[in-house]
Image (tube, grey):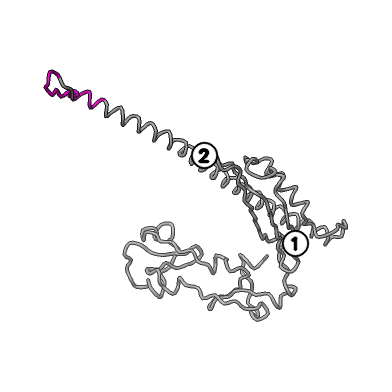
Amino acid sequence: MSRQYGKRVYKTIPFFQRIFCIWNRQEGSATVEAALILPLFIMAAVVFFWMGNLLQTRLIVYDAMQDTAQCLAEYQYAYSYVQDEKTVDLPGNGVNVLTAKERLQHYLDISPVDASCIVGGTGGILVTRSAYSEADGCIDLKLRYKLQINVPFFGELTWKVQEQIRQRAFIGMQLENNETEENRYVYITETGEVYHTSRTCYHIKLTIRQIPDGELSDRYQNLSPCERCAEGRTTDGTVYITETGDRYHLSVSCSGLKRTVMRVKQKNVGSIPPCSNCGNG
């Protein structure tokens, strides 16, 4: 507003000019906000990237630990065999920290592990325990190392990691008593005429199949109707058979398709002969 010759004169800014000024002020504010937020966003993205890298590193080290435990389990079997045969006199029991560290390092050398995430690299992974227990036949393996990450504005952060695995050695199992004919267990059925040495023998573990009844006059013409569920009855389009049976059945729940198997000592079966499939081994 100004005075000209005693009169008040008001100056107004055109509408489009006012819009342009407001836009310029908003654009400047957005630029300041972007300048503040963008570094924080980049820092968060870097941290998440490194966290994923650390997780992958830990998984690879654990895989190497599992591989080492299995290798020690195999080594213990070889050691036990040599000791039983008395061919070589070896000290200790075959499982120790040096053997575990060597195998672990070999696995990590050929793996895609990022050693920069580990304090001291892969050499910074310490095998704190590698021992075999004769009491239960298991191998105990323990590791300790530190993971590290560089966080912008915060510097280097580290934390300790400890892993442990308990692996059964591949040494088989010793029976309390020597297995003889007197204490060996076998399997018989209620109406069976032979005994079986294996519970999975196909004579007692039946595999039931469903077939069209039209195949009874072709591929399975030697089968007779089951006296419990099929004799004197007509089929409804399908029947049930087994691989070793000599009957066909109309009901899958027929007792002729069931086997009541009993586990008894071989000395109690009397004169019953062994099964031709599993009893000759």
Q: Which residue is mark 2?
A: 46
Mark 1 and mark 2 lie on one chain; the one further toward the N terminus is 2
Near mark 1 (Cα within 10 A), the count class, few <14, some 14-19 or many ≥20, is many
Q: Is residue 277 above or below residue 29?
A: below
Q: Is residue 13 magenta?
A: yes
For residue 188, side relative to residue 41 (left or right): right
Q: Residue at x 55, y 42 (%)?
A: 50
Q: CA distance from mark 1 to mark 2?
A: 43 Å
**Are dots 1 and 2 in contact, CB under 8 Å?**
no
Quadrant position of residue 240: bottom left
Q: How many marks?
A: 2
Q: Residue at x 72, y 71 (%)?
A: 175
For residue 106, side relative to residue 3 (left or right): right
Image quadrant holding the C terminus, namely bottom right
Image quadrant holding the N terminus, namely top left
Closest to the camera, between mark 1 and mark 2, is 2
Q: Is residue 41 above or below residue 226?
A: above
Q: Residue at x 76, y 66 (%)?
A: 134
Q: Residue furthest front?
A: 6
Q: What is the magenta range?
A: 4-20
Q: Residue at x 45, y 73 (%)?
A: 256
Where residue 197 appears, x then y in whole percent?
A: 63, 70
Where residue 268 appears, x then y in whole percent?
A: 65, 81
Q: Which residue is mark 1?
A: 132
Between 198 and 214, which is closer to the camera in this rendering?
198
Where residue 142 appears, x then y in whole percent?
A: 69, 57
Q: Is residue 39 magenta?
A: no
For residue 4, side relative to residue 257 (left or right): left
Between 162 and 259, which is closer to the camera in this rendering?
162
Q: Residue furthest top?
A: 5
Quadrant position of residue 194: bottom right
